[in-house]
Image: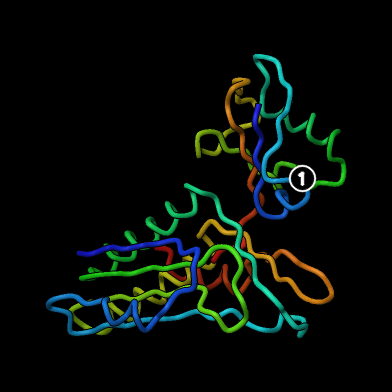
Amino acid sequence: MRIEARLCHDPIDPGAELTSFSSDGAGAMVSFTGIARGTSKAGEKVTKLFLDHHPRLTPASLDTIASVAAKRFDLLAILVLHRAGDVAPGEPIVLVAAAAAHRRAAFEAVDYAMDRLKTDAIFWKREDGFGGSAWIEPTDHDRVARARWED
Amino acid sequence: MKVQFYGSLGEAIGREIELPVEAGITVADIRRQLGMLYPAAKLDQDSARPFLDDEMVGEQQAVAPEATLSFLPPLSGG
């Protein structure tokens, strides 16, 4: 089982990462790329997303989420990449890929990892726009999505 | 003592400050001092969670003057 989680301070290249993401014996590989939006929930233009992080707790939180997903869904490999710092609209913020013997495990692992990342990854996000900046909190939707994985 | 702040707290106060403290000080004492220095900052227990050596600690935790205490606001998530 190959588990890789990285905090990225530079832009993520999903094509390059997925090209090198492989696993012997995998019958399925699923990936998700999250993209920074250009407008806030209120419909205002976002000029930049800023993701603050903790130097040790943040990468540790990515490692934990990747490891738990890999074990829970019996994966062959998992890749979790997450940006920190300034992210421009249209740029990838997060990439999750999972390889498994069969597709169901791969689909569910990526879905699970994303729900965990949305609530448990140690980041603080700020949307910057022409009218000012606002720090983001997880939504009730994120919490409900996270709760559906609890035993 | 070094005190670090993240997220909105870091923006309000700064990433790191140096706070003069005496031996035997607790997290609660530090929180009170910070509240007086930064009255506009959200430093209540729900808005600023204390971490020592990367572990969350309680209000009665004693903090050595040479330690680094961090306050983390609620997460935004990824």
Residue B77 in the image: x percent, y percent?
56, 63
Locate residue A151: give its quadrant. Answer: bottom left
Q: How is the image coloured?
A: rainbow
Label 1 crowd bin: few (<14), some (14–19), many (20+), radius 10 Å: some
Q: Residue furthest top?
A: B23
Q: Amino acid at mark 1?
A: Ile
Q: Nearer the viewer, residue A45 or A30?
A: A45
Residue A45 in the image: x percent, y percent?
75, 83
The residue under the point 53% across, 56% down is A122
Q: Nearer the viewer, residue B12 or A109?
A: B12
Q: Is A101 situated left or right of A56 in this image?
A: left
The residue under the point 51% across, 67% down is A83
The residue under the point 41% across, 71% down is A112
Q: Residue furthest front?
A: A10
Residue A71 in the image: x percent, y percent?
27, 62
Locate residue A134: give its quadrant. Answer: bottom right
Quick check: can you spot residue A50? yes
Q: Secondary structure at mark 1?
A: helix
Residue B67 in the image: x percent, y percent?
58, 26
Q: Is A48 situated left or right of A143 in this image?
A: right
Q: Which residue is mark 1?
A: B13
Q: Is A68 situated left or right of A99 in this image?
A: right
Q: Nearer the viewer, residue A43 or A138?
A: A43
Q: Residue furthest left?
A: A25
Up the image or down, A37 lies above or below A57; here it is below
